[in-house]
Image (cartoon, helix red, strand yellow):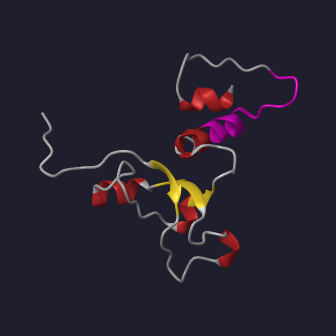
């Protein structure tokens, strides 16, 4: 049996508003104060810090964030990163072309929602 000895905040996907940046963030990324963003916490950071995305404030590497498309609500944007990356990777792996058919053998979930 496995017991946790320290509190851990779960979840990797996140969305929100930029409240602070480091000088290292490239201007071309447009991750400025007040920008609406979404992204994910890297697994290594989540495991070592035990600080996940279900928190009031989250620190993410700039490379793991991007601007949130305007009309998408924050709660929907927060569901995109891991499921979206997984769906795109699976679609690339399948080498789908126009006219191909794809069986999505599941009834729910983030990856299925994006693929369909």
Q: Give the magenta part as a residue range.
A: 87-100
Residue 93, located in which quarter of the rendered image?
Answer: top right
Residue 59 image offset from top left, x and y in percent: 42, 64
Residue 103 image offset from top left, x and y in percent: 68, 17
- Is 32 a magenta residue? no
In the image, taking residue 110 as reference, residue 100 lies left or right, namely right
**Residue at image point 52% right, 26% down:** 109
Compared to residue 21, the image places residue 99 above or below, namely above
Residue most extreme to the right: 99
**Residue at image point 15% right, 52% down:** 6
**Residue at image point 50% right, 79% down:** 22
- Position of the C terminus, as image quadrant, is top right
Towards the viewer: 2 or 30:
30
Number of disc labels: 0
**Residue at image point 36% right, 55% down:** 56
Compared to residue 57, the image places residue 85 above or below, namely above
- Position of the N terminus, as image quadrant, is top left
- Is 95 a magenta residue? yes
In the image, taking residue 99 as reference, residue 48 lies left or right, namely left
Residue 77, located in which quarter of the rendered image?
Answer: top right
Residue 13 image offset from top left, x and y in percent: 47, 47
Residue 75 image offset from top left, x and y in percent: 52, 41
């Amino acid at each position: 049996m496995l017991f946790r000895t320290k509190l851990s905040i779960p979840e990797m996907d996140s969305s929100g508003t930029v409240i602070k940046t480091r000088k290292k963030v490239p201007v071309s990324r447009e991750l400025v104060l007040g920008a609406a963003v979404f992204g994910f916490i890297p697994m290594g950071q989540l495991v070592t810090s035990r600080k996940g995305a279900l928190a009031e404030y989250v620190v993410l590497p700039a490379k793991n964030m991007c601007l949130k498309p305007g009309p998408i609500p924050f709660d929907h944007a927060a569901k995109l990163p891991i499921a979206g990356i997984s769906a795109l990777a699976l679609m690339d792996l399948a080498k789908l072309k126009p006219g191909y058919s794809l069986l999505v053998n599941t009834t729910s979930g983030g990856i299925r929602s994006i693929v369909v």
